[in-house]
């Protein structure tokens, strides 16, 4: 055991107000989004996420998160013009991605590439709202290019340059696979980006706000956010869901697999949520598009398995799927390698992170909580030769 706990320590529950995992702690105000677990709803700047997913493109939602309002036609045209012009990354940034070990996880690649992007910005310390917005758009535009380049490099394929005549989703397929699939598949992907874009003070967003609160820069905050998102209890769960489904392999074995997992008290990836206790607001929409993917590719196996696993988990534990549960098989059926699922989450969540970074910057106070000390009582240092 590497954590020393003072044996004389007596907890004083009435004095000690530890909120393990910050459960229930309200850290600040925010106007970016609201999760309401009682009604299973999630709104971005007042708009229900389901309505945004069905009626808007990801670009409109990105604008909404950054600016607070949905764009009109002219605003969207200008915004897309700016974003499209920022898609290229520098040859040096590409070289950095090429130099990374082929075996490294794509989340490590994107974390490094975003970090390098920060070193290329000679206005890194400028934080007026217009400059912050411009940097946010650069992250939105360049992150997909970095992820797709890493995807191709890892496969030993030539990198495909971004195109300025395509939407973010179309262009991502183009840069990864060299073609743009059926519009239904593009829509399913676009919906996933909208659903993944923002989710109030989740672990990675809170991380970006902590870094921003020290008056650090947007790249450092984003790099920290990527680090937090990588973990399997957060964004990394979408990859783990697919590994689990591949391990189960047969939908007819899913029920027994889940019963065994629960008997062994395993944490089953893609289920549960800190805030939602009776279902994740984003799941019905994503499940619908995962089912659509299954119909398009003509493969029902994963959705059968989805339903079987969900049924047992709800029946036995009343724990519901979170967004990563439908997103995992949906991305798999779109043709992405499993370890690129969480980087796709990054290309969506950069919008929410940047919105929170801008909000934190605009009304900042350093985030500095306390801890309850359970270590040794105060004591004096004895000289080295007298220590036992
Ligand atoms: N599988 C099995 N049991 C689960 C579970 C899961 N995915 N999620 C929660 N539980 C159980 C816990 O074991 C615990 O049971 P207990 O009270 O008998 O000990 C209870 O539900 C409460 O869970 P807890 O771990 O305290 O919830 P949390 O708020 O700290 O954690 C998550 C939330 C999301 C981290 C957790 O549900 C989890 O690890 N899920 C899997 C990873 C995942 O899908 N992450 C993506 C989140 S969007």
Image (spheres, rainbow, N blue to C red):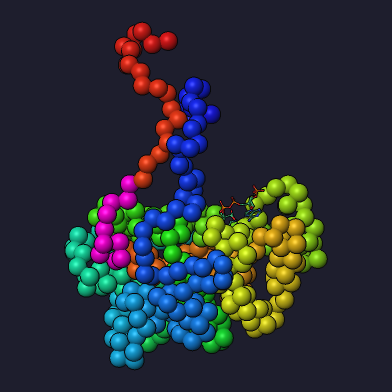
Residue for point 54% across, 57% down: 274
Question: In this image, 107 relative to 29: left or right?
Answer: right
In the figure, residue 330 lies in which quadrant? Answer: bottom right
Res. 157 in view: no
Question: Does residue 27 belong to the magenta stretch?
Answer: no
Give coordinates of residue 292: x percent, y percent. Answer: 63, 82
Question: Depth check: 387 or 101 in front?
Answer: 387
Q: Which residues are magenta?
A: 358-368
Residue 129 in view: yes
- Residue at figure coordinates x 19%, y 60% from the top left: 125
- Taking the view exactly as shown, the residue that stands out farthest to the bottom is 73
Does residue 8 sit above or below 194 in this rendering? above
**What residue is shown at x 32% (from left), y 16% (from top)?**
381
Quadrant of the rendered structure where residue 284 is? bottom right
Vertical side of 233 occupied by 171: above or below: below
Magenta span has 364? Answer: yes
Residue at 34% of width from left, 8% of height from top? 385
Q: Is residue 387 above or below residue 122?
A: above
For this rendering, which residue is in front, 186 or 8?
8
Q: Position of residue 388 (x, y in %)?
A: 42, 10
């Amino acid at each position: 055991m590497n954590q020393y706990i003072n044996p004389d320590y007596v907890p004083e529950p009435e004095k000690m107000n530890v909120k393990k995992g910050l459960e229930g702690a309200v850290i600040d105000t925010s106007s970016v989004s609201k999760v309401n677990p009682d009604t299973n709803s999630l709104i971005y700047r007042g708009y229900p996420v389901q309505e945004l997913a069905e009626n808007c493109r990801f670009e409109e939602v990105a604008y909404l998160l950054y600016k607070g309002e949905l764009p009109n036609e002219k605003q969207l045209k200008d915004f897309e013009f700016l974003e499209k012009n920022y898609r290229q990354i520098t040859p040096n940034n590409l070289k950095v991605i090429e130099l990374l070990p082929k075996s490294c996880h794509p989340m490590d690649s994107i974390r490094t590439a975003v970090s390098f992007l920060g070193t290329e910005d000679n206005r890194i310390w400028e934080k007026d709202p217009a400059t912050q917005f411009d940097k946010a758009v650069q992250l939105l535009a360049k992150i997909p290019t970095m992820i797709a380049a890493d995807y191709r490099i890892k496969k030993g394929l030539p990198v495909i340059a971004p195109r300025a005549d395509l939407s973010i989703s179309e262009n991502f397929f183009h840069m990864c696979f060299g073609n743009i699939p059926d519009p239904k598949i593009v829509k399913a992907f676009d919906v996933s980006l909208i659903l993944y874009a923002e989710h109030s003070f989740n672990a990675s967003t809170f991380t970006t706000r902590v870094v921003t609160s020290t008056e650090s820069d947007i790249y450092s905050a984003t790099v920290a956010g990527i680090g937090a998102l990588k973990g399997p209890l957060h964004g990394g769960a979408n990859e783990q869901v697919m590994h689990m489904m591949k391990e189960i392999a047969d939908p007819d074995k899913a029920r027994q697999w889940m019963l065994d997992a629960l008997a062994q008290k395993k944490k089953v990836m893609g289920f549960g949520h800190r805030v939602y206790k009776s279902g994740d607001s984003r799941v019905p929409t994503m499940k619908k598009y995962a089912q659509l993917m299954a119909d398009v590719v003509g493969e029902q196996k994963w959705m059968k398995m989805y339903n079987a696993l969900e049924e047992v988990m709800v029946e036995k534990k009343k724990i519901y799927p979170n967004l990563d549960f439908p997103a995992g098989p949906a991305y798999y059926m779109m043709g992405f390698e499993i370890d690129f699922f969480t980087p796709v989450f990054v290309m969506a969540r950069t919008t929410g992170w940047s919105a929170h970074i801008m909000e934190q910057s605009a009304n900042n106070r350093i985030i500095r909580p306390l801890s309850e000390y359970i270590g040794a009582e105060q004591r004096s240092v004895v000289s080295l030769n007298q220590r036992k």
